[in-house]
Amino acid sequence: MPKPTNQTYPVFLLVFLFFSDTKTRFRVALIVLAEVAFMAALAIMVLTLAHTWKLRSAIVGSIVVVCSILMYASPLAIMKLVITTKSVEYMPLSISLCFFANGLCWTVYAFIQFDPYILCQAGGLGFNCYILGYYLD
């Protein structure tokens, strides 16, 4: 059963598109289209080329791990600006804490279930510890 939060993402996207300007709307629409095309191509290739459940799980699990680590590492893109200005105003504490709490929950869940695909995402928790370390300075 899907989480109720997953059903609200399209609503947030539509509200964002409704209130954004034309250039931003076009850019976001292209990004969403690229994501949908990637997911469709991935699903078709996995279902036609990988014939065992174990191989399908390994392929999709590996791709999800890479995407998840990239998501957790995304706040590091702003770190150059934070280091140069010596100010964390461009990196809100609330977002950093939410990322940290999310990574912590998934890490605990991975240890309980001992799922290696979820457990390798624990590197995201390390990124968040690094980011939160800047708030302690």
Image (spheres, helix red, strand yellow):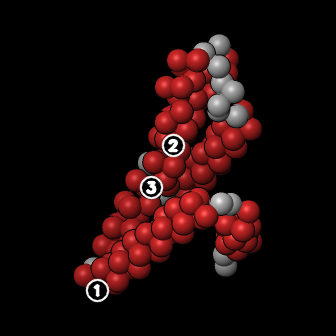
Q: Nearer the viewer, residue 94 or 22?
A: 22
Q: Amino acid at mark 2?
A: Ser
Q: Which numbered disc flags the more N-terminal residue, 1 or 2?
A: 1
Q: Which residue is mark 2?
A: 74
In terms of image quadrants, where is residue 38? Answer: bottom left
The residue at 33%/67% (across/down) is 59
The residue at 60%/15% (across/down) is 86
| Quadrant location of the N terminus in the rendered image | bottom right
Alpha carbon of mark 1 to alpha carbon of mark 3: how far? 22 Å
Q: Amino acid at mark 1?
A: Thr
Q: Amino acid at mark 3?
A: Cys
Select label 1 or label 2 by which is in front: 2
Q: Which residue is mark 1?
A: 48
Q: Which numbered disc flags the more N-terminal residue, 1 or 3?
A: 1
Q: Nearer the viewer, residue 39 or 60?
A: 39
Instruction: Please provide percent x and percent y for residue 127.
Output: 51, 35
